[in-house]
Amino acid sequence: MEEFVLDTGNTAWMLASSALVLLMTPGLAFFYGGMVRGKSVLNMMMMSFGAMGLIAPIWFLYGYSGAFGTDIGGIIGNPFEFFGSNNLDDATSFVSAVGLPVLVFIGFQATFAIITVALISGSVADRMKFSSWLVFAAVWVTFVYIPMAHMVWGGGLLGADGITSSIATPIDFAGGTVVHINAGVAGLVLAILLGRRKGFGKEPMRPHNLPFVMLGAALLWFGWFGFNAGSELAADGTAGRAWVNTTAAAAIAMIAWLATEKVRDGHATSLGAASGIVAGLVAITPAAAAVDTVGALAIGIIAGILCALAVGLKYKYGYDDSLDVVGVHLVGGLTGTVLIGLFAHVGDNVNGTWIPDGAMNGLFYGGGVNQLLAQIIVALFAVVFSGVLTFVIGSIIKATMGLRISQDDEVSGIDLVTHGETAYETLGTSRNFGEA
C-alpha cells in the first residue's frame, strides 16, 4: 500500500467544510421554523435537531461503510467492512490521494446524510408524530439514503461503471440525486401518506416569522459553500469554480423567483427571496464543478422560475407539501441534474486554475446528447427508487405505530401537545400567534 502523505491544507479545508455543512441543519431549522404557524415552530425545529441526533451515530456505525464499502450488487456497500468507523487502513483510496484522512471524509459525509433527512421534514409540518418521524428517519437513511449514496458516489449502479456506462458517466458533483431528488420524492410520498392538514387550501397558513426564514436562508447559503466547494475534497481551482458557481446560481435564482412573483402576484416577497436562494443552491449542487459561470447563471434562472411556479402544484393536485419540499428540492434537484446534459463544461484543476475539459461537454457546448440521456436516466432511477422504498417504509410505520397526530391535537398545536412547551407565551393564553 502506498504511504499516506497528509495534506494539511486540504485537511483544514475539509474540516471547515464539514462544520459549514453541519451548520446547514440548524439553518434549515430556522428556515422551516419560520415558515410554519407559531404553534408548530418548535416541533418543526426539533425535527431537524432530531435528525442530527439520530443520523450521526448511524452514519459512524454503519452508514459510511454501507455507502463506501465494498460493492454488493451495485446497490450498497458492505455495512460491516468499516463498522464503527474502524479498519480504515485500506478505505477510500481517492481520499488518501488528496492527502485527506479517511475520518475527515467520514465526518464530511455524515453531515450530508443529516441534512438530507432533515429536508424531508418540511413536507410533514404540523401533523406528524415526533416518535414516528424519528423511526422514519432512522429507517429511511438506512434503506434509502445509504444505498443511494453508494450507487452514485460509492461505485454502484449510478456511477461511472453503472447503468449508463455505455452512454456517458453521470455527473452528480455534490448531491442532486443523492440529496435533493431523494429527499424531494420522499417528502412527496410522506405528505400523501399523511394526508392534508385540517383547513389546507381553505384557511390561510402563513409563515409566522419571516425574519427566521431569511436568517435560515442566509445560514443555508453560507453552509452551502462547504456543501459544494467542499465536495472537491481539496482546496484547489475546482473548489473555486464550485464556489463561484454556487454564488452565481443562488443570486440569480433569487432574482428570477422575485421576477416571477412580481409578474404573477404583483409583489416580490421576502419569502420568495429566501425560497429563490434555496432553489438556486439546490439546482447548482449537482453541477457545481461541471459548468462554467454562464451555465451556472442559466441554471439559476431556470430553477428560480420553475421552482416558483412549481410550489403552486400542491393546490392543483391536492397534496399537502407543507413547506414546498417538492417544489424546491425535487423540482430544483431534477432541474440541476438534467441541465448538466445541456450546460456541462467540466473542468479540472491545473496549476491552481480551473481548466475546462472539452471532452465532457454538454449539448450546448457541442457534446451531443449522451450526457443529457445519462442525466435523465439517473434522475428517473432516483425518483423511482426513493419513491417506492419511501412508500413501503411509510406504509409500514402508518400501519403499526401510526404517522399522524389526532385532529384535535393538530388544532391545539403540535408544540404544546408533543413537546409540552410553546415558542411564545401568547400561545395558549391571550391569542394564537401565527394562526391567521
Image: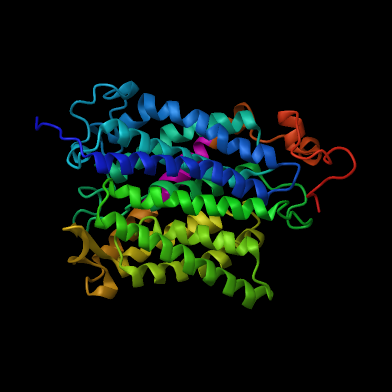
Q: Is residue 346 above or below residue 423?
A: below
x 64%, y 60%: residue: 271
- Does the rendering let one see residue 190? no
Q: Quadrant of residue 14?
A: top left
x 87%, y 45%: residue: 431
Q: Is residue 258 above or below residue 65?
A: below
Horizontal and vertical percent position of residue 363: 27, 72
Q: Quadrant of residue 145?
A: top left
Q: Is 406 or 431 nearer to us in this picture?
A: 431
Q: Is 162 or 97 nearer to us in this picture?
A: 97
Q: Quadrant of residue 420?
A: top right
Q: Is residue 249 above or below residue 85?
A: below
x 68%, y 72%: residue: 267
What quarter of the picture does the N terminus occupy?
top left
Residue range highlighted in magenta: 381-393
By secondary structure, the bulk of the magenta-drawn segment is best described as helix
Q: Is residue 67 left or right of residue 219?
A: left
- Does the rendering let one see residue 315? yes
**Residue farthest toward the right in the current orientation of the protein:** 430
Horizontal and vertical percent position of residue 115: 48, 42
Q: Is residue 281 left or right of residue 161?
A: right
Asked whether residue 383 is drawn in magenta, I would say: yes
Horizontal and vertical percent position of residue 436: 81, 54
Horizontal and vertical percent position of residue 159: 26, 48
Q: Is residue 1 left or right of residue 436?
A: left
